[in-house]
């Protein structure tokens, strides 16, 4: 871990070399997500509620997904940029180094500008808390933390699958963006509002609903207490993701260059 934090420090110093560029990149990321939430705000101003959810409750829902994706994109960016690593034969060098492949790829590319989105998510979360979206208890606060941390792990698993598929395609499959970048967009609403079909897919295939929709029902006193434990069940998604990654590594053949 000390080596990982050393790499993190290097990436931060590199990003801060051009402070104006770093600041403008942060502002750009903020404007993208802010524009998304403004659309929700205007919609709620017209209709009052969507699927029985008020604006503070939707802000809580969106802040969970935004926090999870921001953490994953900041610290697991190396897997998102894995096609470039393969094309430039950098993976060959990683294979002969006496360090874990996962750690090397994580250290390969970090994106600290994504922390700007995390800051925005924290502001949204604080506003929703002050607006009385949830009757908070220590247990509910713990569930909220689990939703964010386990959500980041699920997105990390998706990045892992994305990178593993590159061993077979050599290029990233854009279809994976439905569950990564796309999830940040349609995650502004509870997944249940999209219908049972979508909810089942996001519960049993890609368990994003386990870190957003179902525990949210517990926070809003619309579901039993055991819904609050479902984010922990979502961690099981990392098992097949790891297996797919290992299968891809075994399939890899060096470019010889």
Image (cartoon, rainbow, N blue to C red):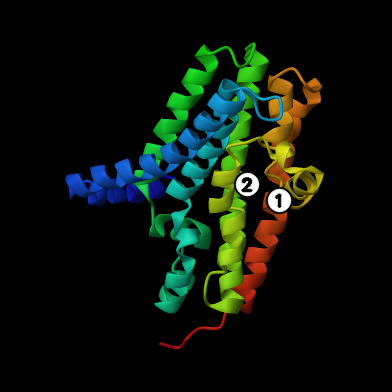
Name the residue at 37% across, 41% down.
Answer: 31
Q: Position of residue 119 (x, y in %)?
A: 40, 32
Name, please, the residue furthest toward the bottom.
Answer: 256
- Estimate the x, y position of residue 196 in percent, counting from the top left: 81, 43
At 66% from the left and 29% from the top, the residue drawn is 50
Where disc 1 sits, the SS reads loop
Dot 2: element: helix
Front residue of 105/20: it is 20
Q: Are marks 2 and 1 in contact (CB under 8 Å)?
A: yes
Q: Quadrant of the N terminus?
A: top left
For residue 191, say whether it is visible: yes
Query: Mark 2 highlights which residue?
Result: 154
Q: CA distance from mark 2 to mark 1?
A: 8 Å
| Residue 96 visible in this rendered orientation of the protein | no
Q: Residues within 10 Å of mark 2 (few under 14, many from 20)?
A: many
Q: Is residue 63 above or below residue 155?
A: above
Q: Nearer the viewer, residue 84 or 180?
A: 180
Q: Hey, which quadrant is residue 138 in on the image?
A: top right
Label disc, if present, on residue 240 of the rendered structure: none
Q: Is residue 180 above or below residue 255?
A: above
Residue 120, how many percent across, how many down? 41, 32
Q: Earlier in the sequence, mark 2 or mark 1?
A: 2
Q: Residue at x 62, y 30 (%)?
A: 146
Left or right of residue 254, residue 208 in this image: right
Q: Is residue 236 above or below residue 217?
A: below
Left or right, 22 with respect to 143, comes to left
- According to the image, label 1 marks what residue? 206
């Amino acid at each position: 871990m000390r080596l990982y934090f050393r790499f993190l420090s290097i990436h931060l110093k590199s990003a801060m070399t051009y402070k104006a560029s770093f600041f403008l990149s942060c502002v750009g990321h903020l404007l993208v997500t802010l524009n998304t939430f403004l659309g929700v705000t205007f919609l709620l101003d017209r209709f009052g509620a969507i699927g029985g959810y008020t604006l503070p409750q939707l802000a809580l829902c969106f802040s969970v997904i935004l926090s999870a994706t921001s953490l994953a994109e900041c610290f697991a960016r190396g897997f998102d940029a894995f096609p470039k690593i393969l094309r430039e034969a950098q993976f060959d060098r990683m294979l002969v180094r006496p360090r874990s492949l996962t750690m090397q790829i994580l250290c390969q590319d970090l994106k600290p500008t994504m922390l700007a989105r995390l800051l925005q998510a924290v502001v949204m979360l604080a506003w929703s808390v002050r607006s009385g979206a949830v009757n908070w208890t220590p247990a509910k606060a713990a569930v909220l933390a689990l939703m964010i941390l386990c959500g980041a792990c699920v997105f990390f698993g998706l990045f892992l699958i994305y990178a593993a598929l590159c061993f077979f395609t050599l290029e990233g499959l854009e279809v994976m963006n439905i569950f990564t970048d796309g999830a940040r967009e349609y995650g502004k609403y509870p997944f249940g509002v999209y219908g049972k079909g979508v909810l089942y897919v996001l519960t049993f295939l890609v368990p994003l609903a386990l870190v957003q929709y179902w525990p949210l029902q517990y926070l809003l006193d619309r579901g039993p207490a055991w819904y609050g434990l479902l984010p922990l069940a979502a961690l099981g998604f990392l098992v097949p993701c790891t297996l797919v990654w290992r299968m891809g590594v075994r399939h890899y053949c060096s470019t010889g260059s």
